[in-house]
């Protein structure tokens, strides 16, 4: 496997692991340390740091260096004024979502904690200089700067290539999610603390509690503690009505069970002293709303449980970002097909289940000539069209993946070898049809090899069998052309 591709896949796998750890709600600093450690271990940088925004300063919160003896670790805990970082971010050049400040373009403010590596310099045009600065600003969904991820000492000694930069952007996005989640968690804890205070004050002032409940910026509900099957709502606030598109009367009439997603009915709090989890609600138009639900039992002045107080924080946007990041990590950006890493994951699941599987390895002949004659933009157009044609021949539960520049793999479940061979013939005919691009009619053809689970029992064996069969088909195509 090409070393650059291997590094890309390793980086994506590490990104998925970091994402899983982030979703496990680990401590913020531990999560950020995982991010910088992964940047150093998987992306080919010798140093990585994350600075977090605290009021008007940025503090070094996480540091990772490939050299354990490196005194860069002494930077952790040091801080600089926000204005100094604003100077750096303003002076730097955009490089995708990253910012790059070449050595000599501007002097770093004295207040910013810095470390100068003992590294040789080169005069080559794309050589990395010890005084170069490459950072990824971390922005919350509302656009507020919450931190900065910075890197140094690329292992190649050169400016990071586009693949490295794209992976670095993904890791920066995960770090931004971690910071944003921590802020949301802090706000939730502060809200719950305020509500607890209001509960204590309820003994003296029912009116004070009612005002806090009604004016809360996120959804609130009071549920009865009677028959668990009823899940009766005693009171709801305006924010919950607005979130779900129901009136106050409608929500109290239909009850909690109606607005909770069918698959999350078991998550409905039933008399628990304290419950916290993510779950799905259904609004008045039956659309799904992801919420962070926190529930606690409120007792009356006599200490007897009186009602369940439930807080709903809309986290749909955060969930959407997580889905988008996962999709980017597992799919080809040009065709939208699963990439090599996702193909292996799906194939491993099928093999583990003992499913009857056929793997078709498809290589496009004449594609290099298309790029040479028409250019890469037209080549990309052809790849997208071929990907579409391949998808039209398979079922919903089958997989079509792009695993290389002009290579595709199809994974077909519950299909015989004879059926796979028939499908291969249809695919070859369809791929051979001209691709129309403006006035041009462009031709490519497919060499397809088949590996099936009757002879191969592991993922490696299936892919190897299909790959070898593809090369035999390629040789046959050349012999007859």
Image (cartoon, rainbow, N blue to C red):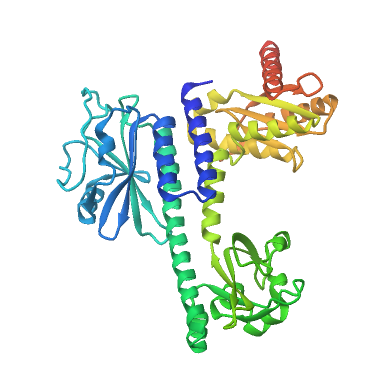
Please give the name of the residue rendered at 27% of the width and 26% of the height, measured from the top-left corner: 127
The percent position of residue 387, horizontal first and vertical second, equals 64, 37
The percent position of residue 273, horizontal first and vertical second, equals 61, 67
Q: Quadrant of the N terminus?
A: top right
Snapshot quadrant of residue 224: bottom right
Q: Residue furthest front?
A: 302
Q: How many dots with numbers?
A: 0
Please give the name of the residue rendered at 72% of the width and 26% of the height, measured from the top-left corner: 360
- Can I make out residue 441 in this image? no
In the image: residue 131, left or right of residue 446: left
451 shown above or below 354: above
- Can I make out residue 462 in this image? yes
The percent position of residue 21, horizontal first and vertical second, equals 52, 44
In this view of the protein, which residue sits in the foreground, 29 or 93?
29
The percent position of residue 245, horizontal first and vertical second, equals 61, 76
272 shown above or below 443: below
Please give the name of the residue rendered at 47% of the width and 86% of the height, measured from the top-left corner: 208
Q: Residue furthest top?
A: 479
Please give the name of the residue rendered at 37% of the width and 46% of the height, measured from the top-left corner: 97
In this view of the protein, which residue sits in the foreground, 122 or 59?
59
Q: Quadrant of the C terminus?
A: top right
In this view of the protein, which residue sits in the foreground, 300 or 153?
300
403 shown above or below 85: above
């Amino acid at each position: 496997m090409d070393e650059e591709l291997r590094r890309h896949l390793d980086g994506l796998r590490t990104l998925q692991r970091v994402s899983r750890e982030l979703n496990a709600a680990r401590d913020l600093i531990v999560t950020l340390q995982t991010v910088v450690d992964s940047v150093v271990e998987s992306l080919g940088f010798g140093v990585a740091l994350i600075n977090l925004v605290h009021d008007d300063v940025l503090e070094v919160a996480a540091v990772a260096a490939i050299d354990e003896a490196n005194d860069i670790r002494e930077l952790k805990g040091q801080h600089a004024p926000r204005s100094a970082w604003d100077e750096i971010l303003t002076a730097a050049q955009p490089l995708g979502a990253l910012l790059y400040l070449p050595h000599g373009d501007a002097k770093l403010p004295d207040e910013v904690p810095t470390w100068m590596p003992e590294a040789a310099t080169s005069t080559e045009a794309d050589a990395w200089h010890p005084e170069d600065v490459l950072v990824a600003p971390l922005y919350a969904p509302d656009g507020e700067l919450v931190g900065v991820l910075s890197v140094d000492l690329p292992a190649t000694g050169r400016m990071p290539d586009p693949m490295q930069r794209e992976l670095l952007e993904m890791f920066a996005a995960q770090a931004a999610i971690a910071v944003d989640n921590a802020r949301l968690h802090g706000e939730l804890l502060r809200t719950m603390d305020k509500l607890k205070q209001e509960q204590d004050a309820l003994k003296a002032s029912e009116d004070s509690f009612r005002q806090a409940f009604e004016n809360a910026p996120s959804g609130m509900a009071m549920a009865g503690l009677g028959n668990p099957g009823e899940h009766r709502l005693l009171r709801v606030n305006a924010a919950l009505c607005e979130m779900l598109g129901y009136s106050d009367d409608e929500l109290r009439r239909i009850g909690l069970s109606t607005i909770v997603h069918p698959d999350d009915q078991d998550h409905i709090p039933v008399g628990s002293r304290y419950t916290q989890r993510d779950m799905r609600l259904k609004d008045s138009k039956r659309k799904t709303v992801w919420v962070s639900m926190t529930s606690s039992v409120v007792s009356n002045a006599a200490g007897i449980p009186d009602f369940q107080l439930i807080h709903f924080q809309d986290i749909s946007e955060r969930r959407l970002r997580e889905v988008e990041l996962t999709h980017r990590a597992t799919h080809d950006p040009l065709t939208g097909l699963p990439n090599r890493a996702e193909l292996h994951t799906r194939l491993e699941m099928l093999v583990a289940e003992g499913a009857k599987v056929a793997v078709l390895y498809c290589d496009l002949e004449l594609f290099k000539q298309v790029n040479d004659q028409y250019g890469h933009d037209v080549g990309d157009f052809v790849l997208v069209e071929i990907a579409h044609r391949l998808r039209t021949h398979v079922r919903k539960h089958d997989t079509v993946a792009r695993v290389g520049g002009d290579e595709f793999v199809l994974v077909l479940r519950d299909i015989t070898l004879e059926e796979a061979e028939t499908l291969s013939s249809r695919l070859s005919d369809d791929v051979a049809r001209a691709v129309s691009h403006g006035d041009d009619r462009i031709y490519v053809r497919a060499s397809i090899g088949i590996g099936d689970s009757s002879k191969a029992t592991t993922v490696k064996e299936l892919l190897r069998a299909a790959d070898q069969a593809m090369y035999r088909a390629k040789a046959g195509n050349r012999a007859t052309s």
